[in-house]
Image: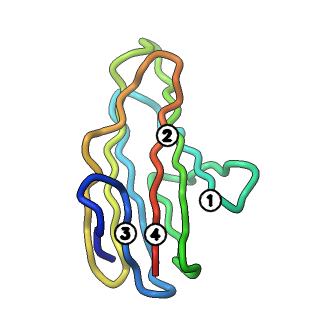
Amino acid sequence: MEKVSTTGRVFKCATGEQVTLSFVAHNVDMRITYRFDDEAEPKIVQGDSLTFPVTKELTILRVFFHFINEGGTGGSYDITLAGSLGGNFPDKPPVKQSGVLVPVRRYAFAV
């Protein structure tokens, strides 16, 4: 996997390459959901990572970050992307808590 955009979250992958997004929660209970563009309903990330194969010419992934903590402020998530054939990319900056909003990050994977 290689990053092809310096300003966006666009990656080039080999057909069938496994992509893993790893998440580290700070000051918040882990609660992340995701949806591929061809899906109507989001799914819950199980554990602290999400792995999927890139099999289509273009795969769009949206990741939704939910913040569940007592203080209601100060939480964040760090994200790292990795390809099974190489490539490791920290996704900066961290996703920070912003009131009741559910921040979303959009990723594009092309073969």
The residue wearing badge 4 is: 109
- Pointer 2 residue: 104
Q: Earlier in the sequence, mark 4 or mark 3?
A: 3
Q: What is the CA distance from the residue labelled 4 to the residue labelled 1?
A: 11 Å
Tell me if label 2 and label 3 are in contact, CB under 8 Å. Answer: no
Q: Residue at x 34, y 50 (%)?
A: 79
Q: Secondary structure at mark 1?
A: strand
The three-letter code of the residue at mark 1 reads Phe
Quadrant of res 13: bottom left
Vertical order, 17 against 62 (above or below) = below
Tag 4, which secondary structure?
strand
Choose top left, top right, bottom left or bottom right for residue 9: bottom left
Residue tagged 3: 11
Contact flag, marks 4 and 3 (Cβ < 8 Å): yes
Residue 55: x percent and y percent? 57, 82
Q: Amino acid at mark 2?
A: Val
Mark 4 vs 1, N-terminal side: 1
SS state under label 2: strand
